[in-house]
Image: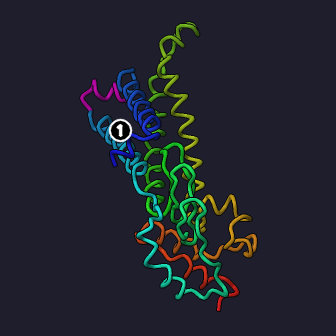
Amino acid sequence: MMQNMFRTGFLVRATHTLLTWVITLILFLHNTDLRKCEERGELLLPVLFFLLVVLSVLLYFAVSLMDPGFVLADSVKGSNEEMESMIPQSSTPRLRRCGHCLLQQPMRAKHCQTCKHCVRRFDHHCPWIENCVGERNHRWFIVYLLVQLLALLWALHIALSGISPSLTWALWFRVNGFLLAALAVVGVFSVVAAMLLGIHLYLVSINCTTWEFMSRHRIAYLKNCGDEENPFDRGVFCNMWDFFCICRTVAWEQTYDRNTPNSV
């Protein structure tokens, strides 16, 4: 884990963490609702906000440093023959061998050029966390987005509460400069986090990944499916339940074979 922290993603993670705590410090030091609560001795809201920020940072590092579901040689070798014998080859596309890491890819896996590994149920490589989002960390990525969005929206409200009027525009910008900068950063990240959360919740509800949604026409096991057909979709409730509550490696080949029209 420590080796992961100090590779190329160190700068991204350090920037995210530094920006988070600089904005938090600005909100606590200026004349915002947080500062007013502190002065009145009402510490509940400041403590809750601080804990929410800490939780968002911890989730960020957990998702960033977590194994997203890398396909490793020792996890595939013993199961290839058994898996292929369980799946009717007439209806299910054959498992293909990755041209980069030379491992046999499970269905819904894809090789990431940045991480240099094949990732199970590959969704996308996220430059924000400098890690892939895949089968093992996708649910935690969504939990992180939710917590981060809550923290950002609360920070937006706090920053707005600290904006003070002035006699001239020049004086107003000078007095509120740091808060305005914090507002701009928090506002942009709030929009991004809200959009990402909405998109991922929608994709989870139909059991589709970002990669499958964007590159459907290039994926072998989806080419022969209709435009509105998804062989992995089991309904919104079942999709959500399986995604958030079932923590195991899924044999997607079996799900595909059961749900495709030409299965035997």
Q: Is residue 36 magenta?
A: yes
Residue 16 image position (x, y, % from top left): 45, 35
Sort mark 1 into few (<14), some (14-19) or many (20+) by Cα contacts within 10 Å: some
Residue 39 image position (x, y, % from top left): 28, 24
Q: Is residue 138 left or right of residue 43?
A: right
Nearest the viewer among 186 and 70 is 70
The magenta stretch is 34-42
Amino acid type for the residue under numbered disc 1? Phe
Residue 76 image position (x, y, % from top left): 46, 72
Residue 196 image position (x, y, % from top left): 57, 49
Q: Main secondary structure of the magenta part?
A: helix
Q: Is residue 21 magenta?
A: no
- For the point 26% across and 32% down, the residue is 42
- For the point 55% across and 28% down, the residue is 184
Nearest the viewer among 196 and 62 is 62
Q: Is residue 238 visible?
A: yes
Look at the picture and state if 166 lies above or below 74. Answer: above
Q: Quadrant of residue 158?
A: top left
Q: Is residue 27 left or right of residue 187?
A: left
Residue wearing tag 1: 49
Q: Kindly state the secondary structure of the residue where label 1 is placed.
A: helix
Q: Quadrant of residue 31?
A: top left
